[in-house]
Amino acid sequence: MLTYPQPKTGLEGKFSLQYALAAGVLDGQYTLWSCTDEAVHRTQLHALYPRLSVAEDPRCTGDDPLLETRSSGSRGVVEVEAVRTDGQRATVRIARAPGHPSCELTWDDIATKFMDCVTHTRINPGKAERAFGILKRLETCVDVREVLTLLH
Amino acid sequence: MTKPLHTGWAARSALAAIQLARSGFTAAPDVLEAPAGFFAAYGVEASKPEAAMEQLGRPWVLVDPGLALKRFPCCYAVHRGMDGVLQLRHRLGFTAANLEHLVCRMPPGASGC
């Protein structure tokens, strides 16, 4: 499902629904590291894949008359259901991805993402935090070189 | 590397097109809605070029609904399923050890990229 039901590299993992679900179950979060070869190769994932299933379901069509014109990430509704070994279960239905204009990311979400990206660079974290502070009020930043210098 | 490259190329092409148009460069005026135009190439059966032309810039989608920011570093088609896993993990408190089964149901046609 999606391009790679059993991804072999981090790049393939970015286009795999099965991997995305498994990594979320395993880690409880998604970071840039989630899409590395190292993360995709973890053996614990193989025990998880048989417990995950993915299907297209007409009940997720919704009532959008323009459904056929929508992209994969924005058409209809996605439903996820989980069952614990003790029988407890729950279901969520999600129409819009987090970060869509109708459910914007908070500044905390964006800061978390920004600083996660920084850990994959040689940028000093303290300087990155200062740069992020300036980026939050970019409209009033007098000299944009201030940010560029901190991120170099 | 491809993702940032094709986004950058799209932006570069847009700027080049604007500069060419401003300099008096001409091209087919119906390139979007013509029978063998952009919409015919990239649309689907249900696409309505005339509706798209009517709404073009009223307002620009950059303004309304506005930009979407990705929360996760992967294909947008996967994001709602991922959000679902995190929400359920929080609600049910499961881990890889005590998860019996998890199913992700997608709308028809939404499982390709």
Image (spheres, rainbow, N blue to C red):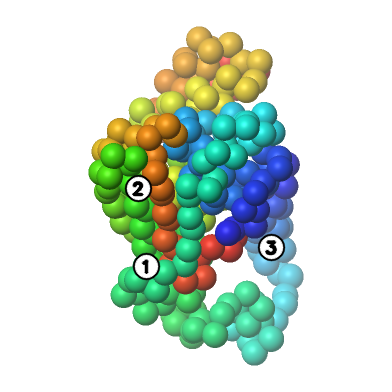
Rendering coords of residue B100 (x, y %): 39, 44
- Is residue A86 or residue A18 the one in the foreground? A86
Q: As shown in the figure, which amino acid type bears the numbered disc 3? A: Ala
At mark 1, the secondary structure is helix
Kindly give the residue lying farthest to the bottom in the view shown.
B35
- In space, the residues marked 3 and 2 are separated at their CA atoms by 49 Å
Q: As shown in the figure, which amino acid type bears the numbered disc 2? A: Ala
Rendering coords of residue B3 (x, y %): 67, 47
Q: As shown in the figure, which amino acid type bears the numbered disc 1? A: Cys
Residue A60: image tag: 1
Residue under numbered circle 2 = A82
Q: Identify the residue at horizontal 36%, vertical 57% (top origin).
A: A79
Location of residue B3 with respect to B38 vertically, above or below: above
Left or right position of B60 against A87: right
Location of residue A88 with respect to A142 vertically, above or below: below
Residue B17: image tag: 3
- Is residue B1 or residue B112 the one in the foreground? B112
- Is residue A134 or residue A102 the one in the foreground? A102
Q: Residues within 10 Å of mark 3 (few under 14, many from 20)?
A: few
Residue B60 lies in quadrant: bottom left
Between circles 3 and 2, the one closer to the viewer is 2
Which quadrant is home to the N terminus of chain A? bottom right
Q: Identify the residue at horizontal 53%, vertical 48% (top origin).
A: A50
Residue B64 lies in quadrant: bottom left
What's the chain of the residue with tag 2? A
